[in-house]
Amino acid sequence: MKLLFHTIVLEPARWTPQRISCRLIDLLGPIAASGFNQLEIYELHLNDDPVEIRDSLARHQLQPLVLSSYINLNPTVTSDAELSAQIEVLVERIQFFGFKSLRIFPGSQMSPTDSAGIHQFTDRLRSLAQRLPQIQLLLETHDHSLADDPRLLVRIVEDLALPNVGVLYQPTIFTAESALEQWALQKHLIRHIHLQNRNSDQSFATVQDGVIPWKLLLANLPEGVNATLEFVPVSICSIEQFNLDATLAQARSEMEYIRQIACVE
């Protein structure tokens, strides 16, 4: 298993209207110095000079493997023309940086009971997959999307039967029972994992200490599946409280724990 570092870990503005508070090129050196070399990149971190970012990635010997995109295939949010234009921008970005995989939400803000919407979403997903045949499309099992129904998401992926469409597993509901049930349903379709954990009150926890039994899950990881360290508790704070050094130190600690419980390259 390759263990990736998600640049969103270092973005305290991610859930604010501001969305970003720092330039990616200012983070790449500290990320590399902390021992991470393969990245999943928060798409908004790329809203800067692309040549400068690409050169900095190369200088620090960092590989951008997964693009964590916010393109929305929900037909009530984007028209076909708008989506087509967004896809072309996305394709250009993927090719420019050399990403191997694309993370997307499976119908953000869509209801699993919306039959007509599901049909349109599936058609859009098929078109995107065919437009990017060499890129692995990873449907993140995020709440407030079609992933709220784990069986529905399995059905969509199985019906598409495309080699470059799979599931990016994270618990949709953060309880051990729900996470294990979801894992059992989706394991055969999992192509990537987002590592994060929660306490019983849903506050963020370390991978080791939260309610999700990652040690058990990673012991049963399908062959060829990689994982991304997505959040660390110390970074869940305001922009003013954010401490880069403390966040990277906790990320290193998380990395060491994951190395202990899983086979990490």
Image (cartoon, rainbow, N blue to C red):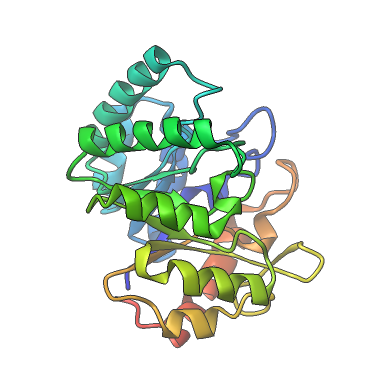
Query: In the rendered image of this protein, does residue 211 appear above or below residue 65?
Result: below
Residue at point 54% right, 59% down? Answer: 150
| Quarter that holds the N terminus | bottom left
Residue placed farthest to the front in the image? Answer: 115
Query: In the rendered image of this protein, does residue 140 appear above or below residue 95?
Result: below
Residue at point 54% right, 78% down? Answer: 214
Residue placed farthest to the left in the image? Answer: 134
Q: Nearer the viewer, residue 110 or 58?
A: 110
| Location of residue 88 (image quadrant) | top left
Residue at point 27% right, 39% down? Answer: 129
Left or right? Give the position of 200 relative to 50.
right
Query: In the rendered image of this protein, does residue 76 appear above or below residue 260?
Result: above
Residue placed farthest to the top in the image? Answer: 81
Whether residue 57 can be seen here: yes
Count of marks, rendered view: 0
Q: Position of residue 253 (x, y in %)?
A: 55, 75
| Quarter that holds the C terminus | bottom left
Q: Position of residue 109 (x, y in %)?
A: 62, 36
Whether residue 249 can be seen here: no
Residue at point 38% right, 62% down? Answer: 192
Q: Position of residue 84 (x, y in %)?
A: 33, 19
Q: Nearer the viewer, residue 128 or 212?
A: 128
Residue placed farthest to the right in the image? Answer: 201
Q: Position of residue 105 (x, y in %)?
A: 49, 43
Q: Nearer the viewer, residue 237 or 82?
A: 82
Q: Nearer the viewer, residue 33 or 82?
A: 82
